[in-house]
Amino acid sequence: MVDHLANTEINSQRIAAVENCFGASGQPLAVPGRVLLGEGILTKECRKKPKPRIFFLFNDILVYGSIVINKRKYNSQHIIPLEDVTLETLPDTLQMKNRWMIKTSKKSFVVSAASLTERKEWISHLEECIRHLLTKTGRQPSTEHAAPWIPDKATDICMRCTQTKFSTLTRRHHCRKCGFVVCADCSRQRFLMPRLSPKPLRVCNLCYRQLLAEKKKEAEADRRQPEPIHSSIPGYEPSSGDDSDKSDDDKADQWPADTEFYTSEVSWSSFHS
């Protein structure tokens, strides 16, 4: 499919249409050899509640963003190199069906498709693209993944001390290492995790102690042997927008209230041939 679509006018038009929908807030997506293989709306499990997101599968990257006007305007563009992606199928919950997790070294999150068939299509196409890239580059599948954030509504109390009860005045926080929902007293520490951010990030007290121990162990090992050379995934500029969902809680996601994502017979995804 990739060879068939590469360098064709229809593929160039499809990619240009995606760039136009993101406008100036998005990054250029047209590069030699890149093919748009599929697109569709998936429900992403965000911090506060599940939300619809538009996803575009290319042969080397996965792009997603918030929906302002479907098929016309998107924002908060995020670009994920497929070489860094691992997938994990998940069981259904009361709120979300046909779920799977997209795991990367920088961020992991849960999405769901409107039907089991669409989930199978997405996972099949993603896995095929990932296999092709890893074979081409000779890299091994990624083994380090960022922890997914547990949604705010999953707990009313701190998941570390189990004493503090959250309220309007007592805020929830997330540990960037384990993804737990924790109180301020249990997450006062910051730790530099270059894989996730160039700035020190909030971590819970337990993870902070573990990270300090790991850092000490690595320092001792470094003194005994030469520093290894680490290969890195081809770099992309930081994706536009913050993925914290703060900017798009109310204004974006103009989703028809009467739309039933899981029960309608509408197909929310399509793959090109």
Image (tube, rainbow, N blue to C red):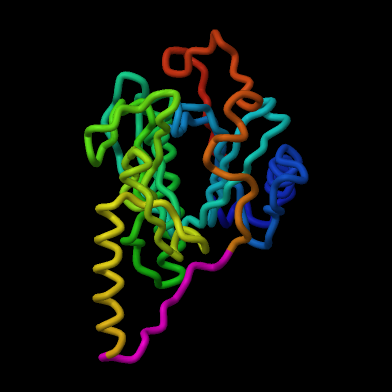
Residue 226 included in the magenta stretch of the image? yes
Decide whether the magenta segment is chiefly helix, strand or loop.
Answer: loop
* 31 sits to left or right of 78: right
- Would residue 130 be seen by someone viewing this image from the given angle? no
Counting from the top left corner in percent of width and height, residue 136 is at: 46, 68
Please tell me whether residue 43 is drawn above or below residue 60 in the rendered image.
above
Residue pictured at 29% horizontal, 89% vertical: 223
Q: Quadrant of residue 31?
A: bottom right
**Residue numbers of the magenta segment:** 224-235
Counting from the top left corner in percent of width and height, residue 166 is at: 35, 27
* 160 sits to left or right of 138: left
Please tell me whether residue 221 is drawn above or below residue 180 in the rendered image.
below
Marks counted in the figure total: 0
- Residue reaching furthest to the top: 258
Q: Quadrant of residue 130?
A: bottom left
Counting from the top left corner in percent of width and height, residue 60 is at: 53, 57
Counting from the top left corner in percent of width and height, residue 265 is at: 48, 14
Instruction: Identify which residue, 111 or 49, lies in the foreground.
Output: 49
